[in-house]
Structures are given as structure tokens and as C-alpha cells.
Image (spheres, rainbow, N blue to C red):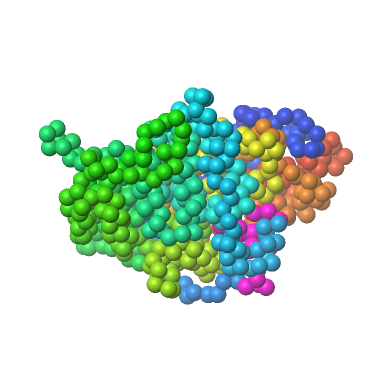
Amino acid sequence: MLDGPSIIDDNDAVADPHPAAQATPTGTWRPTETHGALAAALLLAACDSGGGGGGSGSGLVTVPTPAPVPTPTPSPSPSPTAAALTAQGASRFLAQATMGANRTSIDAVLNTGIAGWIDAQFARPRDPSHWDWLVSKGFNDATNNNNINGQNGYDASVWRQAIAGSDPLRQRVSLALLDFLVVGIGGLNMPWRAFSMAAYHDLLLDHAFGNYRDLLGAITRSPAMGSFLSSAGSRKANPSNGSMPDENFARELMQLFTLGVYQLEQDGSVRMSNGVPLETYTQDDVSQLARVFTGLNTVNFDNATPDRMRSPMQVYVTANETGAATVLGATVSGGGMAAVDAALDILFRHPNVAPFVSRQLIQRMVTSNPSRGYVGRVAAVFANNGSGVRGDMKAVIRAVLLDSEARDDAAALASASAGRLRDPVQRLTNWARAFGVTSPSDAWAIGDTTSTTLRLGQSIGRSPSVFGFMRPGYAPPGTAMAQAGMTAPEFQVASEQTNIAYVNYMQSLVGGGTGDVKADYAPMMALASDSQKLVDEVNLILAAGQLRASTVTTIRAAVDSIPLTANNATLNRTGVAILLTLAAPDYLVLK
């Protein structure tokens, strides 16, 4: 039932907003020598689409974390051993655990096994931070007013790490966290926005393998979060003028970061009373919690450097409420950071946190519709890692990626509800990591890709609201998925318009890159004289071998339509195989 988004066939004349330059086989394939390749991609992507084109962003479901469709709880089964693991299975795992596979990473998983690969990733040191990269490139130069008031450098840094980072699991987890612990650079009302957002992204990277309680403390103190959700500068109530503490962060901390709106069983299902979902918190809980966060602000107000955007916020006593605040039936008092931490402890201990966070991570990494058993198993690990520790992210990540429901490739391929639509951003990074994209100048000039008419309709760190680009309970209205009670969050950013823009944009990137951001197709070109070998290798690396036989036949026919005697034949045959794979519904939905 989960299938590719619908893309209308708009004939061969679909405008390419970023036409590829004509070049030699060293890096650019020539679409003028493969007339109709773009139209073929659109036609291929339109096949067997399952009606995903309705996901225009309207018709949001009202329950943020609805009960999954009742399914039998599967019995846990052992994860595949290194000996039983196939190249297709390794590629599928990497599509869940990283921003994209390549032949080297597939071989690494085959050599160590999935569990061993995860452990090796946990042991890897962090790549240099976004902050340090911005400093190294001079973006902290206060003589350039665009640095202080603009967003210079942020996009380049995040694309650099997502594409070329040597810690791919940490990158993947941090971006999954950014999807629901949302800060968007466009919503920051502060100077040095690139550095503020870089510091927030670094915070997620630093805590990706730590403890979720520590992560909650860090985001609460983050200047970027303080600006985005207006907790920075919130002041205690003033009876003389009727002003009240800002409630924005307190509400979203409960609704989106920890508890959700409705009480949950440990398997993620919603608790009901007489057919009505039981709410998790009240408006009074929001108001009381907001009092705890009064007085928070940056450590100083010096804009000569961006440094204050990296330091945790502190409490200014003159603006801080020190009286008692009762949240979820527990009381904190005394004010200051002690009260902030006590309130966070109350939320962290709430039974909703384990299934709420676990389901979000499963949705972002593995499948949009996890069974109750899957959610329950991961939530149990969140609640207790086996050594009495709650919120151990390493244990939770292992549980998400090693669960039988995540690792049973055959069952996933046969299931009507398994899998997820790949995020547009991940489709770009899949291509980039698969084919060795580099930027020799280190400029990484990809930029903002949020345009829905010219680019992806999504970009890292550029969420338009605290709800992110997609809500976890979204289902495309009027579709079989919605009628079946299924969720498909990524379809919220899928429409005819965005899908055509995606194919157009990826044609330009596959064909000629952007700036000096270019792929190395030499290993693929070595296979290009044999369409079967070429398409099979692209299928393995990009699509985890999940292209259907009919799709493979269609792509091979397009490749073989380019004679080996044509100019730049091997490069153009390679480009067509890659573009058509990126457009195929069997690729777009990762099972």
C-alpha cells in the first residue's frame, strides 16, 4: 500500500531550471544526446503510484501519534548474522542507518555484520563541528554585515557533513532528531543565525549517542531553541501590566519533544476512555511549566562575535519565577536552573516518553507504520537499557535498527504497510554518497533546496515551523493509506509539483552537479557497456536491489537506446541509469 508518489507526465518539454552544461566524460553527461531521458524519468515515476499525489500539505490528521493499525505482534527473531547477510540487505540497512550507501560501505557491513558496524560507528570520533568549519572559512568576520544578519555558510556546512561526513550513523540520527526536535534557521530572530543554527545542529550531533535526558537539557538551554520557540527573554508574570510568561516552549516541549498530546500504552497505542483519547497534559500544566523557564537568555548580548550563540543560556534572576510550579502533578520551586532540571526530570520520567520518542525514531529511520510490537520492544529498551538506565540513545538506536521488523528483508518487501517514502533530502544525499560527490573547493554550493517548484521542497535545518516538514501522524487525504488508518509522514511534502521539481533538479545534479559539487562516475562507467551489469549495480547501491523486474527492464531499455558508438556513450548510459532509478517508485519507497 505504501507506494511511490504520483508524478504527472508533462511531455518532453518539462523545463529544466538548472540545465546541465555540455562537457566531456570527466564529469557531465549530455542530456541533449539522450533526448527524452527526463520524460522517461517522469513516466517511470508515474507508474503504479498508489495515489500519493494528494499530499499537498492539507488535511492533517488531528491525532499527532495515532494508534497504529492493529496487527499481530511479531515474535522477536534473530537479526541476520554476518554470514547470512546479503549485499542487498546491507544496502537496505545503510539506507535506514545513513544518508546513503556506496560499494565501500556495503562491503564494510558485509565484513563486520550489522551489529559490528553499529558498534564501530559508536566508537568513531565526531567529525569537526559545523561551528568550527564556519570559523575556519571566516564566516565569523563581523566586518561583513551579511555574516551577522544573514545565513552565510550554514547550508554548505550541513551538505558537507551529510554527503562527505565520516560518521554516517551519527549524521543520520542527528537529522532524525532534527525532524522532531525542530529548529529552523528561517525562524531565528537573532543575529549570527548561521552560527546559532550550526550550534544547535552540533548539539544534536554531540548528544546523538548520549542520553535523551541530557539532550532535553541541552536543547532547553540552546540559544537557537530559545529564539525559535521564544523562551529566551521570557519573564515572570507582572501583575501591574498583566504580562504573563511565554508558553511556547513549554507547550512544544510536552507536545512534540517528550509526551505527545494523548496518553500512550508502551506499544504506542492511544489510551481511550469511553471512546475518547485521554489527554496527556492540560493548559494549566503548560502555564505552570512556562513559569519555570522564565529568566532564560544568552550569557551576554555582545554581537561583535557569534560566541554567545554557542554558550548555553543562563537564568537571569530578575526575570525568573521562584515560586512553586506544579506540572503533571509534581511540584518544583526555588527557580533557577535547579527548577528547570527538576521540571525536565518530571517530563523525562513520564511513561509516554519511551513510546513517543521510540515511534518517532522508527518512523524517521525504518518504517512509517511500525507494529505495536516493534514500538513496544524499542520503548522497553528506552525505559531500561538492561542496566537500569533510561534514555540510553545507543541502546535505543541498536533496538531500532536490529529489531526483527527492521531486519527481515523478505517480510518487509512482502508487506503492504512496511517501509517509508524517502525524504527528498535523503534522495539527494543517497545519490551523492553513492557516487562519490566531492567539492574540491570545500564550498559545497548546493544551497537552500526548499523551493517546491525548482528544487526538493525540503532542506536541512530549514523547517518552516516547529512541526517540521512532516507530521508523524500525516496521511495523504483521500487515499487508500488514509482509509486504512496508516500514516505516511513524508507524503506531506510530495505533490505533482514537488515531484516534477525533484526529477528536474536531480537531472541537473546527476548531469553536471552544481558549482564544483560533482560525482565520480568512473566505477559505473566501467560497467556501462553492459546494461544489465550497470543497472544491477545502480539498483544495489541506490535502491538496495528493490527495483521490480519491470522497472529494471524499462531502465535497461532506456540505457540500451544509447548506442555504444555515440559520443560520450558510457557516461550518458550511466547518467540515464542513475536518473531513472532515482525517479522509480520502487526506489522512492524504501521497503
Quadrant, the C terminus: bottom right
Q: In the rendering, at what x and y percent does residue 31 appear?
A: 73, 34
Q: Between residues 32 and 89, which one lies in front from this camera angle?
A: 89
Q: Is residue 488 at all visible to an observer of this figure? A: no
Based on the picture, tell me whether residue 89 belongs to the magenta stretch.
yes
Q: In the rendering, at what x and y percent does residue 174 appear?
A: 50, 51
Tell me the residue at 76%/51% (across/down): 534
User: Is 303 rendered above or below residue 180?
Assistant: above
Residue 453 placement, left or right of 84: left
Q: Between residues 356 and 164, which one lies in front from this camera angle?
A: 164
Quadrant of the image occupied by residue 378: bottom left
Q: Which residues are magenta?
A: 81-103
Q: Between residues 183 and 89, which one lies in front from this camera angle?
A: 183
Tell me the residue at 57%/71% (across/down): 79
Quadrant of the image occupied by residue 574: top right
Q: In the rendering, at what x and y percent does residue 577 appear?
A: 72, 46
Tell me the residue at 64%/59% (across/down): 91
User: Is 86 rendered above or below residue 483?
Assistant: below
Tell me the residue at 39%/49% (across/down): 219
Residue 516 placement, left or right of 406: right
